[in-house]
Image (cartoon, grey):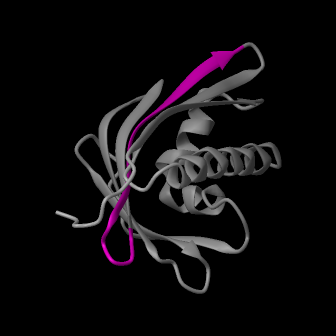
Amino acid sequence: MSTATAEVAHDTIVLERNFTHPPEAVFDAYADVDQRVSWSVPSDDEVIIYETADFRVGGIDQFLCGPREQPNFAGTTEYHHIDSSSIVFTERLADDSKLLLAVSLVTWQFNATPTGCTLVVTDQVTSTAGQGPIEGSRTGYGAVLDNLVRILEAR
């Protein structure tokens, strides 16, 4: 248990992106860890390194992320539900001293449209470090989803 007093904050972030690809292609871009690495950092100055990746119900991904020269955040993702229309997982993010920063319940919904797919990502986040991790989730998810659109649409 931490001896420091932290501000606990909560928020629900909902982001939506449209694709000209079918839901299966967008789902596959998440399911395949090599594809995920190609779009899942907010900027060229950042990196994500998967130490383990086990995309299945009950599976756990462990990763480091942050600045390219020193990825100082540790993340753990646990998958609770996976089917062709949705992925539900929890994610834990800690700093390099193992201090918990945030825990999220995240849902990715893949909705078929006449022209492709609408992806809706809902991140129900609890931060133990105030608003910073929540804003980081909001801007980070926005940037990585924009990357996903750009990469898929370039194919």
Measuring 60% from the left and 57% from the top, which residue is drawn there?
40
The quarter of the picture where residue 117 lies is: top right
Q: Position of residue 99 (x, y in %)?
A: 32, 68
Q: Position of residue 93 (x, y in %)?
A: 39, 59
The answer to whether one can see residue 84 in this image is no
Measuring 28% from the left and 54% from the top, which residue is drawn there?
60
Q: Which of 147 and 19 is in front in this view?
A: 147
Measuring 73% from the left and 70% from the top, which residue is drawn there?
44
Residue 23 as seen in the image, left or right of residue 5? right
Check if residue 112 falls in the magenta segment.
Answer: yes
Check if residue 69 falls in the magenta segment.
Answer: no
Number of dots carrying numbers: 0
Residue at the limit of the structure toward the top, as seen here: 114
What segment is highlighted magenta in the picture? Answer: 95-113
Q: Where is residue 140 in the image (x, y as percent from the top left)?
A: 63, 52
The answer to whether one can see residue 21 in this image is yes
Residue 67 as seen in the image, left or right of residue 90? right
The prevailing secondary structure element of the residues shown in magenta is: strand
Q: Which of 95 and 31 is in front in this view?
A: 95
Q: Where is residue 115 in the image (x, y as percent from the top left)?
A: 78, 19
Q: Nearer the viewer, residue 127 or 13?
A: 127
- Compared with 81, 2 (above or below) is below
Image quadrant holding the N terminus, namely: bottom left
- Compared with 125, 91 (above or below) is below
Residue at the limit of the structure toward the front, as seen here: 5
Residue at the limit of the structure toward the right, as seen here: 154
